[in-house]
Structures are given as C-alpha cells and as structure tokens.
Image (cartoon, grey):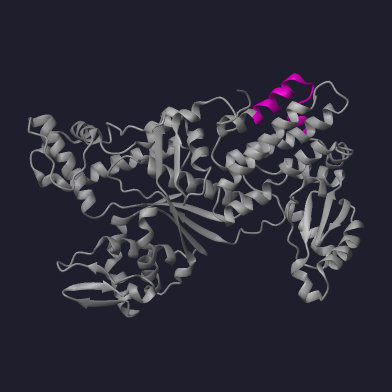
Amino acid sequence: MMQNIKQIVDEALGISSILEKPRDRKFGHFALPTFSFAKSLRKSPQSIAEEFAQKLESLPQIASVNVVGGYVNFSLSDTFLGICAWEFLQQDSKSSNSKQIQNESEKILLEYVSANPTGPLHIGHARGAIFGDSLARIGKFLGFHIVSEYYINDAGVQIENLGKSIYYAGRHLFFGESYELPEGCYKGEYILDLAQVVKKSLGLKVFEDLSELALLSEFGKNEMLKEIQENLAQLGIVFDCYVSEKELFSRWDSTLQTLKEHNGIYEEEGRLWLKSSECGDEKDRVVVRENGEPTYLAGDIIYHGDKFARHFDHYINIWGADHHGYIARVKAAINFLGYDSSKLEVLLSQMVALLKNGEAYKMSKRAGNFILMKEVVEEVGADALRLIFLSKKADTHLEFDVEELKKQDSSNPVYYINYAHARIHTLFSKSNFKIEDFKNLARDSFATSLENMEENLCSLLVLSLGLDKVLMDAFVQRAPNKVVDFLKMLASEFHRFYNETKILNTEKQEQILKVLVVVAESLNLGLALLGVRAKKSM
C-alpha cells in the first residue's frame, strides 16, 4: 500500500516524496516532511507544506489534509483503503503484487550455514540458518531472484580427522581397545553412533587398520551431511543447491594462475602469499604452505571464484561473528581474481546464550561439548525457535530462556501473535460468514462496504496494510526482526480492538469482519515469510 500511495502523491506534486508515519495518530495516516525541498524551492517548509496540501486535497484517494509546521499530514479515504485491502487479499502468498516490486532481474546468491560436515548442527548454527532462510523467503516474495546455497567444507584435515575419529571409536567398540583419540579428532556419542552405522554398512574390515581412512572419512562426511540436512528440515530450511569444496579443488591450479596474473601472489620463505594487505587486510595471508599444501583460505578463494563466475548481480554470505577478520582477505582474493568484491556482502551472526530456568542450558551428551540444535527444536518447537531468533538483529547478542517460550501469555511473542490470528478465526467460526467468501467478493463491492469505518477500525486496517513496506525495509536492511516487531504491534492493536469492541451480532459486524480478514492475512503472511505457521486455533 505504501508504495501505491507514494506514487499517487509523487505524481500529484511532481516530486519524489518521503512518507512517514505521524508520531500522533490523530494527525492522520501519513506525514510528508517538506524540509528537504526548502533549499531547491527557495521557500520555507511551512509555505511548501501549504502548497502541497492544496494539491493533495483534490485527490480522491485522500480524505483529509492538514499542515503542522513543515509537515503535510493526510488520511486516506475509506474507499481507497478498501481497494488496497481487496488487492492485498488477492495476492499470491508466494509473491507480492505490489507495483513497486520490479526486482526479477536482480539475481542474488545467498550462502549461509555452511557448517563443516564433521558433526551435527549446534544452536549457534541455528541462528544463521534461520536468519538466512527468512531473508531468502522475504526476498523471493518481493520478486528478487535468490538462490540459497550451502558450501560443503569437505576437503582438508577436518574430514580426515572425522575418519580417524570413527576409526578409533570402532576400535574401541568392536575390538575392546581403550578409547583414546589423537589431537584434532572429534568426541561425542555421535562418533560412536557413526561407527555403528559404518559397521552395519561397510563391515568390520574397515576398522582393521588405517588403510581405509579415506573411505571412513567420505562415509562419515556423507552421513553427517545427511543429518545436517535433516536438522535443517526440522526448521523448515531447504537449500536450492549444495557446492562441494572437494569437487572444486580440481580448479586450484587455474585459480592460482589467475591470482598470479593479476599480481596478487608472491613467494617468500618457501610459501605463497596473497597480497591481501593491499586490499585492506591487516596483513598478507599464506595460501600455499612450505610443503606445497594449500591452506584453508585456498578453498574459499576457489569457491568465491566459482561464485562470481556464475554471474549473479549480488552475493550475500552469512558468517558467524568469529569470521569478522576473514572478510578482508576473501574480498582481496575476489579482486585479484578479476572480479568486483563490492558485490559481496558479508552479514555476521552473533552467538546465542541459551538458558533453562535461569541456568545455563546443559551441553548435549551426544555432541559432547555443545548444545545440539535438534534437541532445542524438539523441546520448544521450530516455530518458537525461529521467531525468538528473529526477534533481534542477527549481529546483536541474543540470550533467552527456553522456559519463557513455553508460556501461554503475552510475554511469549509466539503465543501472543498466534493468539491474535486464532482469535479472528474463532470469530468467523461463531459468525455466519466465511473468510473465503470475503476474499472472493468483487473489488468495488468489497471497497464500498468499508466506507464510514470507525476510527479505531480504520487505524487497524491501515496498520495491517503496512506489511509491504515492512517487508521491503526488512529485506533491504537485512533485518527480519522488523517483521517480528510489526507482527507484535499488529497483534497488540488487534487484541486492544477485540477487548474494546463488540464485534458479533452488531450493526457493523460484517464490516469489522472484512477488516479482520485483512488483519489475519497480514499476520499469516508475515509469519509465513519468517518460516512460522500461523495457528487457526489455540
């Protein structure tokens, strides 16, 4: 709705306006500040506001206009709001029909999670996963062409150590040896579980000596990747594609040659260095060790070369906050590969402090030294976890108590928002109307029926129709928490209206219910784009 109004106002005034919400609702639905035009028009904001007000008063979409200082405040007509409401109800739940959404040509590659396939996902992984998935959902709805991608770190010493971990677990379980793991190996009951799966699938022969280490490593990696995908599916997260580091490594020689051709590599003390300090890094970085083995950075250089070779318009990486120092070296590599590193945007996701009844949440026995994402999802539910993780910006610290998410009151945002949605469906179940009947009405009939709304009902409708701007702001600012804030506000306003207004068996029953269809649809859509299912009953 907001963009439609902006377009109408801009055409009437011959300017590009910035519309705001007045601090006080009594001033109107929207405010247009004029201060930025004072210099170019050589007039005071007050006189500009008065001129703009005269032009806006003639628009059929606007019911009233008033000037306060340098602001033009105005309210929309009920009929226009009715048309906006009808159009909102007609849109596909998977894509916006708002006129300002023209982003089909912008292709974005969004990479997130990308946890090493050496163990199950922990609660820290969950935050980046939920953030990335919600960002992708919102962006796709708005019309951006987004591809979500998981980079599988399946090359290097960590995968070899996974194989060793499984081998020594097998020696312990099946040959009675003491369970002692070399440095760098992975601990936890999940390794013992993997050894059992290996025995069932490959037999005991692979545990006789380390000659089958490569097979154990590959098998273990595939099993962990399968479990990671299952963990993500619990949260409703499915990636468009997976890219294997191991498969990409065949391109290392050609990638290194490209870096050399762009004068991004030098040799010193038997090692090859990336000149990352020339691109803002605090120092140069080793890409090939003295023994000729590429470093961990080499894999990321190949991967980002592969990304940029696929010619997306923009690239977004969601990394853990501990990767902050890694950004400059990766961007340097992109530049030395001959690409524009400004197209890469790195978003950082902070860790999470998890409590239970005020105490630190216990580490998982299965994982050994961290909290499993799967166990938390099973305790509080995917919807609750998603909403609480999205309640704050991803780059801020988050602490929450899982017991708080089980409360059935207004302190629990999951319950509070869902209760609003369920209340509306309950109202319809007690009335003689059906939601779908209202959605199927002709536009003019629907719009006309909303004329002469009471002020509180009109305000509720205007708030509901503000979802489109909230979604665009949330995507552009990479802040899905804005959607959560909107949903909490909308739920609060609905609950207030519900408690103050008699709805059923009144003269205004049908009109109110039509507005509440829009409220319910706004709640439902907002939750869906956060990956949360709206409940119809509680």
Magenta region: 420-438
Q: Residue at x 32, y 80 (%)?
A: 263
Q: Is residue 441 above or below residue 347?
A: above
Res 437 quadrant in image: top right
Q: Position of residue 177 (x, y in %)?
A: 7, 33
Q: Nearer the viewer, residue 21 or 239?
A: 21
Q: Judge whether residue 431 is colored magenta.
A: yes
Q: Residue at x 58, y 26 (%)?
A: 409
Q: Position of residue 236 (x, y in %)?
A: 48, 38
Task: Answer with left or right where residue 139 lies relative to residue 115.
Answer: right
Res 459 quadrant in image: top right
Q: Judge whether residue 289 is colored magenta.
A: no
Q: Nearer the viewer, residue 70 or 182?
A: 70
Q: Position of residue 318 (x, y in %)?
A: 44, 54
Q: Nearer the viewer, residue 122 or 199?
A: 122
Prevalent SS, magenta region: helix
Res 531 quadrant in image: top right
Q: Is residue 384 above or below residue 255?
A: above
Q: Residue at x 22, y 36 (%)?
A: 191
Q: Is residue 47 above or below residue 519?
A: below
The answer, for residue 181, to whether it is visible in the render is: yes
Q: Position of residue 391 (x, y in %)?
A: 53, 42
